[in-house]
Each structure stands twice: as C-alpha cells, then as structure tokens.
Amino acid sequence: MKNKSNYLKVFGPNSISKYLFYLFRAISVGLLLFIIYIDLSFFLGTAEIINGRYYISLPILGVIAKGDYQTNIIITITLGLLYGTIFFYVLSNIFKAFVSETVFTESAIRHLRYFSFLNLVIGPLLYIMTHFIIMQHSDYRDIHNPILNIIFGATALFIVHIFKKGYAIQSDNDLTI
C-alpha cells in the first residue's frame, strides 16, 4: 500500500486549496492592476488615439491593448474586468477557507454565499446593464455568460446548504467529544 502523504491533499495547509487560493488571488490582483493601468491611461491622456481607436502599451506584458475609442465600450470593459476581479477575489476567499484543517467553517459558508450572490444577482444584472443599457444591443448575443453565472450561483447555493449541514454536524460532534 502506498503512503498517503505522497499525494497532494484537497484541504488543509499543504493542499490544492492553498495553491488555488494563491492562483485566484493573483488573478484578481492582476486584473485590478490592469483596470487601474488602462483607466489611468485614458484619464491621464497617455493612451494613443488614432482614427477613433485607442492603443495602450502594456510594457510588462509586451503587448498593446487596442479597441474602439467609445465611452460605452470603455465603461463596458471596465465593468467586465471589475466583475472578473471581484469574481476571482471571492473565489480565492473560498479556497482560503479550505486551507484550514476544518473544512466546514462559518468562513467557508459566508464566502460561498457571497459567490452565490455574485453569480445569481450581480452577474446577470451586469449583463443586462452592459448589454442593453450601456451598449444598447437589442439581441441576446453572449447570453451564455449570464446562463453560466446562474449555473455557478445555483451550484454554489446548493454547496452552501451542504456546508451548513456539515457545519452543524461538525459542531455537534465537537461538543460530544
């Protein structure tokens, strides 16, 4: 029989959860820095505007961000990236809660609730706001995005209830010991 310590654990201090926490936190910080850099480029006038298109040099990545220079497009991009920043931040907090040896915690339940709310309410509202109000589209292109949000949110909501039951059982078990 193989030694179980050779396998990477899912929960706990040296686990996949720890690495996913760092990965998703890094993505959220990276997105936030990207938003700040892009928006500051517009605000400070360092974005190059040629024939109605913007060009922003991203020196660290060695690429140029470009697109149509229209207020509604810039607002939509900023809101979409801000949503992505919050999404990965909340997701990182879920995995941070899983780094402890105790899986069923109030912290995990709270962060799973935030994730549910973010996907069930904020994601679809953001789609409606950016798609129909800001961009003024009359069709349902990219409808898969709010559908995925609703699927993620509903799944997370079920997991919240599973974790609530697990937390109650764990609390009862700790009291009897």
Image: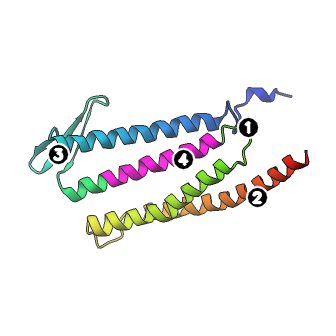
Whether label 2 touches label 1, CB < 8 Å: no
Where, quadrant-wise, is the C terminus in this rendering?
A: top right
Question: Spatial distance from mark 4 to mark 2, Cα to Cα?
Answer: 21 Å
What range of the chain is rendered magenta? 78-97
Question: Which one is nearer the viewer's eye here, 89 or 58?
Answer: 89
- Neighbours of disc 4 within 10 Å: few (<14), some (14-19), many (20+): many
Q: Earlier in the sequence, mark 3 or mark 1?
A: 3
Tag 3, which secondary structure? strand
Q: State which tag comes first along the sequence, 1 or 4.
A: 4
Question: Could you tell me how far apart the alpha carbons at marks 4 and 3 are, in whole angstroms?
Answer: 32 Å
Cα gap from disc 2 to disc 3, whole angstroms: 52 Å
* Label 4 sits on residue: 91
The residue beneath circle 2 is: 165
Tell us which disc is closer to us: 2 or 3. 2
Residue 101 is labelled as 1
At 65% from the left and 49% from the top, the residue drawn is 108
Magenta-drawn stretch contains 82:
yes
- Discs 3/1, front: 1
